[in-house]
Image (cartoon, helix red, strand yellow):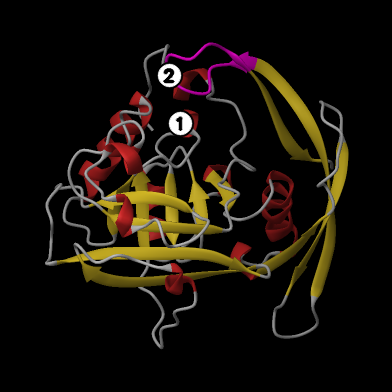
Amino acid sequence: MSSAPADHCSQLNDHEPLAGSALTDERILILEQPGAWGRDAVNDSALEPKIWRDVGNCRVLLARHPDRTRPSHKRHWWTLQVRDSAIVGQHGQVDWSQTLTDRVWSLTSPDAPMGSVFICTNGKRDQCCAEFGRRLLKKFRGESKLWEVSHLGGHRFAPTALVFPSGLMCGKLEQTDLTKLLNGGTPAQGVIRGRIGRSPTRQVAELEAAEQLRVPLTDLSSHDTSENLPAGSGTTTSVTISADTGGEPLTTSVALALRGGSPRPKSCGKPPDSTEYWLPIN
């Protein structure tokens, strides 16, 4: 990524590990909505609440084509949900005025959903997302798999991305990383934030286990034992990871420790805040 001005949060947090910073929501709905979004994209855009309010408990994100046009007479929608340890993605289209219900979570398709990559460009939330997200998108003009998306969290890791249907989240993306994602590959481990629907400890442990076991991150399942851990730097825990490779199942346990860093702003213009992150114990 090109260097940012010294007061940008992405510059001030340049050395913070990305692992463990992915969204922990187990259900995410993405709705196509062109036009301006505002700081709170869902509530500040022209999207009518009736379109999405009956889909149940989930995080709602908005998406639009980088050229900001309405590409068809129907609205695209995507869902990501965690089932056991797997992430299931569904995609469909509805009329622009048609409402969605909680039925979208039970829909199945005979065909695998086409892969897409959503890049955060929600500049009303943070200038790093707008500046670096759009700068990256300009290098891929005309790419049908790319979408702008509203707030993904982790402004300080801009440009950030959510990959569909794997639920993988990345940050500090370079052009080569995005090319790999668009081709169905996995970028360098250092730009992976984790997979959605998992606690930070599971996200970090899965990344470590994927490297240890030499298996794709998406083939792993994990069991978290850290729900009632005490807070504070120095806390330790372990996560059990297994992988189904078609033969004998592989299992490993990853030990983690909570580390603290220097206070830094987590978003542009915000005051410095304490930072903590989980790291594997070698």
* Label total for image: 2
Q: Residue furthest bottom?
A: 110
Give the residue type at disc 2.
Cys
Task: From the viewer's perspective, tell me whether residue 32 is left or right of residue 169.
Answer: left
Which image quarter is the N terminus in?
top left
Q: Write the residue at 85% across / 52% down.
A: 225
* Residue 214 position in % (x across, y down): 69, 64
Which image quarter is the C terminus in?
top right
Task: From the viewer's perspective, tell me whether residue 109 is left or right of residue 221.
Answer: left
Residue that label 1 marks: 155
| Residue 163 visible in rendering | yes
* Residue 23 position in % (x across, y down): 56, 47
- CA gap, disc 1 and disc 2: 8 Å
In the rendered structure, find residue 268 and report the number of the disc placed on it: 2
Q: Judging from the image, what secondary structure is the residue with disc 1 in?
A: helix
Q: Which residues are magenta?
A: 263-273
Picture quarter containing residue 220?
Answer: bottom right
Q: Write the residue at 53% across / 49% down.
A: 188
Task: From the viewer's perspective, tell me whether residue 150 is left or right of residue 240.
Answer: left
